[in-house]
Amino acid sequence: MIIGSHVKFNKEQLFGSVKEAILYGANTFMFYTGAPQNTIRKEIDNDLLLKAKELMISSGIDIKNVICHAPYIVNLANNISDEKWQFSINFLKQELSRCEILGIKYIVLHPGSAVGLPIDVALKNISDALNLIIKDDGPMILLETMAGKGSECGRNLEEIKIILDNVSSSNIGVCLDTCHLNDAGYDMKDFNKYLDEFDKLIGISKIHCIHINDSKNELGTHKDRHENIGFGTLGFDTILDIINNPKIKDVPKILETPYIDREYAPYKQEIEMIKSGKFNPNLIEEIKEYYK
């Protein structure tokens, strides 16, 4: 099982990220190279990077399974302001360069929001931008499946396929998100059916990351509100079945579940629960006790 969670990337950069992942009992992780809401980025510290790589080797974390996430402010779908669109393109190029320096193979990207543009125009904008950004020998961009909140692009398989079909490079893939898929209208209780549809339209080999989240919402509500594992509408058994599905055995699974009381990271206990295969209804209380 290749499983981890979102972790911080702060003063100790990737070295701090690795240390946090180890605390959670993870063998992979996902991080932003800076705050997801802004473009402030610090130069990569080579000494910290070397320490991070040494610690990954000694703790059994394969850097090929580690995932970076692009910041939310990047929007490749809307080019009403050419200046803002070009800024998103240039900033994402910088993030890819940072991933190259760090040795990270994958970066997850929210495709973007149309914000007043027709959906077909927005999807073309995304493909056009990716054709300017992607390098065949660089990190692979993974388009994240979205819930369809507001004017989000990538809310169904058809939209993801349109984007992929119009990208000239093969160095592009997909990141599934279980909460987003549920909220978009895909029944995760029949995950094999979804994978069959995905394989038919896109090809299952394009899946390189899965965000594992329960959802606060009913099927098809297009709201995108994550819930802790087993405490939402998907439920523990459904999520466990997804994680253990043999078709995606070698795909890294990343928890993005909410902090308890917006303060306590749940990942150590959630990973333990997933590894044991047994739902713990007292999880929330135990997490609060753990951090006391």
Image: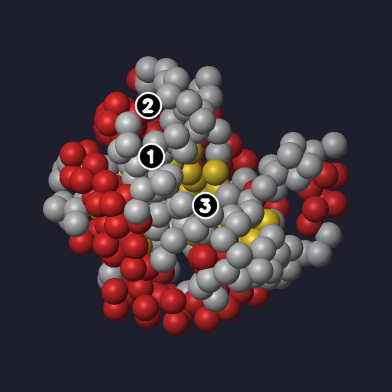
Which residue lies at the image location 43% right of the left edge and 45% below the top edge? 115
* Image side of residue 96 versus residue 273, left or right: left
Label drawn at residue 108: none
* Amino acid on which the number 2 mark rests in the picture: Leu
* Image side of residue 144 versus residue 140, left or right: right
Which is more toward the observer, 278 or 162? 162
Secondary-structure class at tag 3: loop
Q: Quadrant of the C terminus?
A: top right
State how the image is colored: secondary structure
Whether residues under marks 2 and 1 lie with C-beta atoms below 8 angstroms apart, the answer is: no
**Residue 173 location in percent, x, y?**
30, 56
Which is more toward the observer, 199 or 236? 199
Work out whether mark 3 precedes mark 1 in sequence or the reverse, and give the earlier one.
1
**Residue 262 location in percent, x, y?**
74, 39
Secondary-structure class at tag 1: loop
Q: Which residue is mark 2?
A: 50
* Amino acid on which the number 3 mark rests in the picture: Gly
* Image side of residue 140 versus residue 11, left or right: left
Q: Which residue is mark 3?
A: 150
Q: Which residue is mark 1?
A: 75
Q: CA distance from mark 3 to mark 2?
A: 42 Å
Work out whether mark 3 precedes mark 2 in sequence or the reverse, and give the earlier one.
2
Q: CA distance from mark 2 to mark 1?
A: 32 Å
As drawn, 289 above or below 12: below
Other-residue count near label 2 (Cα within 10 Å), few / some / many at <14 / 14–19 / ≥20:
some
